[in-house]
Image: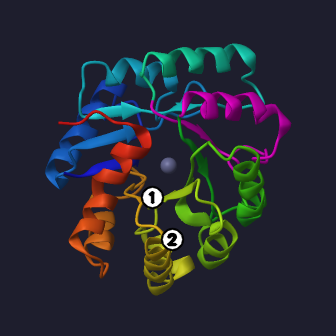
Amino acid sequence: MIIDAHVHLPEKNEQRRYEQSKAQLLTDMQQAGVDHAILIPDNVSPSSIGDLPTCLELVKDTPQLFLMGTIDIQTQGDAWIAYLDGLIAQRRIVAIKIFPGHDPIYPTDPRLAPVYAMCQARKVPMVIHTGCNTNHPEVAQYNDPKHIVQVARQYPEMKIVIAHYFFPEVDYCYATTRPYPNIFFDTSGLADAEVIAATGAERIRSVLLKTLQDDPKKIIFGTDYAMCTFQEHMALISHLSITEAVRQDIFWRNAVELFKLTVI
Ligand SMILES: [Zn+2]
C-alpha cells in the first residue's frame, strides 16, 4: 500500500473546475499506484488549489482522500480555530498545516498558541512548511528549524511534521531537530528537479538514511503533487538501501500511525 501524506489539487483554471482537478488527482494516483492521499487545501480564499471548505466538499464520499485543515493566523482567529476544532472532533481533518515563509509569520508567533494547544489536546499532528522558495530565498528565515524546535519543546506531546526538510539546508535541519522525538518529516518535494539541483541528490539520500537510522518512524512518504510527481518520489524511496519493513513504514505504516488513518 502507498499513502501520500502531502498532495494539493491540480490548479483550477478556465478549463478546469475543482471537480475536474479532483478527478485528475484520482486518475494520477491510480496510475502511479497510490492508494490514499492527504489533501492539503490553501490557507487563502479563493484559491486555484481550493480552500478548506472547497476541499471538504470534494473529499466527501471519497475514501481514497483524507484532508488537512489549514490556517493563516494573520487573518483567521478564534472563530476559524473553533471551526478546525469541530472538524477534528468529527474526524473530517487529520492534521493542521501552517505556512511560515509563504506567510510572513514565525512558528513561534504567539497567535499560534491556541492552535498548538488544540493539536496537542486533540492529538492531531501539526505540519509545517519549510525550505527556501527559489525566487525568494529570504523567506526561509521564517521556517528555520531553530524556531520549530522551540515549539517542539513547548508542546512535547504535539507531533510536528516538517515538510520539505528545510531544503537546501537539510543537514542543518537534521542536526537541529535530532534531539526531538516529536519531530517527523515528510518527503514532499525532495525528488523534485529544482530541489535536487539546490540540495544535491546524495545529500538528500544521506540525510534520509541518517534520520531513519535514528528512528524509522520519522519519515513519512509525501510528494507535493501536483507541483511534483508521484513517480519521482516513489523512486527516491524505492532506491534507498533500507529493509523492506522500513520501506513499508515510509510508504504507509508511519502515516497510518501518525495521522490515525482508517485504511483498508
Ligand atoms: Zn505542499
| x 49%, y 79%: residue | 210
In the figure, is residue 181 to the left or right of 37? right
Disc assigned to residue 188:
1
- Label 2 packing within 10 angstroms: few (<14), some (14-19), many (20+): many
Quadrant that contains the C terminus? top left
Quadrant of residue 123 in the image?
A: top right
Q: In this view of the protein, can residue 9 be seen by the observer?
A: no
Quick one: SS at disc 1? loop
The CB of the residue at mark 1 lies under 8 Å from ligand 1: yes
Frontmost residue, 37 versus 179: 179
Whether residue 93 appears in this view of the structure is yes
The answer to if 182 sits in the magenta stretch is: no
Distance from disc 1 to disc 2, alpha carbons, whole Å, reads: 10 Å
Q: Position of residue 184 (x, y in %)?
A: 53, 57
Dot 1 crowding, Cα within 10 Å, few <14, some 14–19, many 20+: many
Q: Is residue 210 left or right of residue 12?
A: right
Task: Find disc 2 in the rendering and name its residue.
Answer: 195
What element does badge 2 sit on?
A: helix
Where is residue 155 shown, x and y percent of the image?
70, 43
Q: Amino acid at mark 1?
A: Ser
Q: Which residues are magenta?
A: 94-123
Q: Position of residue 195 (x, y in %)?
A: 51, 71
User: Is 73 above or below relative to 3?
Assistant: above
Q: 147 left or right of 196?
A: right
Magenta span includes 102: yes
* Relative side of 103 to 256, left or right: right
Going from the N terminus, do you reach mark 1 or mark 2 first?
1
Measuring from the top left, give residue 59's x and y in whole percent: 33, 25
Q: Nearer the viewer, mark 1 or mark 2?
A: 1
Residue at position x 30%, y 82% from top? 241
Q: Amino acid at mark 2?
A: Val
